[in-house]
Image: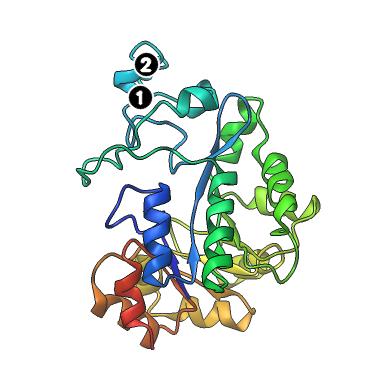
């Protein structure tokens, strides 16, 4: 499968309705929203727990940074976030997008699926659950409440929930998520024993491209032996690279900033 990483973020500001819609139109199989919480416990689509990299928050609310100079989403209400312009960072000149809520994202995908009769899925990532918990805002419970409303928690739904924190995946299963879980990996490749542990709490892994290459593809082979799907991140506009991972390493999907490029590379 081809998963649109933060939407078609190579073309339009990441995690905006414009980027998600463009990825959908390009033919992506699934769309990825990263999720963090606002002060009033609303899930919004944002890659970082802070706002300044991809919005104009520093100009809108210059006195609201913490001592480290960062503007944390958890310190802002949804109404305040709605006043921000999502710039997408330095690589985009496009301005004027808004930061959507997860509910708005789900409604957008549902609307497009209804109109096109396609079944494009979603791959939400819960960002920094331990940070949210330390702030007194447990993100897992709020996420499960949200996906229950649309049925995405059920087995067989077009939803894969992902996270870097293993404890969160365990917690999600405990509180009723039956749809697939994906454990994101960073650092050194997991050993076979570690992969076996992952297979008890997840149905897929998301390693970096470099992690797969450093093992000569053995990571994919070992994961497949344990019935774990392998979906590496993050692919750019290099069609040959994407084709190589499909053909040489036999991965089950890709996270790509350029869904159209990855789709051309798919066997």
How many numbered marks does the figure carry?
Answer: 2
Residue 208 visible in the current orientation:
no
**Residue 186 in the figure: left or right of residue 224:** left
Secondary element at image label 1: helix
Across and down, in percent, residue 141 comes to: 73, 41
Disc 2 to disc 1, C-alpha distance = 6 Å
Residue 231 place in picture, x, y as percent? 48, 70
Left or right: residue 128 compared with residue 235: right
Q: Residues within 10 Å of mark 2 (few under 14, many from 20)?
A: few
The residue sitting at 34% across, 29% down in the picture is 52
Q: Identify whether 102 is placed above or below 50.
A: below
Quarter assignment of residue 64: top left
- Is residue 131 depicted above or below 116 in this figure? above
- Please report the residue visible at 54 percent of the width from the left and 40 percent of the height from the top: 101
What's the residue at 38%, 28% (across, down)? Answer: 84
**Mark 2 touching mark 1, by CB under 8 A?**
yes
**Residue identified by numbered label 1:** 57
């Amino acid at each position: 499968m081809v998963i649109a990483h933060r939407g078609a973020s190579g073309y339009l500001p990441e995690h905006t309705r414009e980027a998600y819609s463009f990825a959908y139109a390009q033919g992506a199989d699934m769309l990825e929203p990263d999720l963090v919480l606002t002060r009033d416990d609303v899930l919004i689509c944002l890659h970082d727990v802070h706002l300044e990299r991809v919005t104009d928050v520093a100009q809108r609310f210059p006195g609201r940074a913490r001592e480290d100079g960062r503007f944390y989403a958890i310190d802002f209400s949804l109404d305040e976030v709605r006043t921000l312009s999502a710039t997408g960072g330095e690589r985009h000149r496009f301005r004027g997008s808004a930061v959507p809520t997860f509910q708005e994202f789900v409604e957008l995908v549902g609307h497009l699926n209804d109109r096109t009769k396609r079944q494009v899925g979603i791959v939400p990532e819960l960002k920094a659950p331990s940070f949210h918990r330390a702030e007194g805002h447990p993100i897992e419970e709020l996420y499960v409440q949200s996906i229950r409303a649309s049925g995405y928690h059920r087995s067989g739904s077009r939803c894969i929930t992902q996270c870097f924190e293993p404890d969160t995946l365990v917690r999600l299963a405990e509180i009723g998520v039956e749809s697939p879980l994906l454990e994101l990996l960073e650092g050194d490749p997991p050993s076979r024993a570690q992969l076996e542990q992952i297979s008890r709490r997840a149905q897929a892994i998301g390693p970096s491209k470099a992690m797969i290459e450093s093992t000569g593809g053995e990571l994919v082979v070992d994961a497949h032996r344990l019935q774990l799907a392998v979906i590496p991140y993050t692919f750019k506009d290099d069609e040959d690279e994407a084709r190589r991972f499909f053909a040489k390493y036999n991965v089950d999907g890709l996270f790509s900033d350029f869904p159209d490029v990855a789709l051309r590379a798919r066997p």
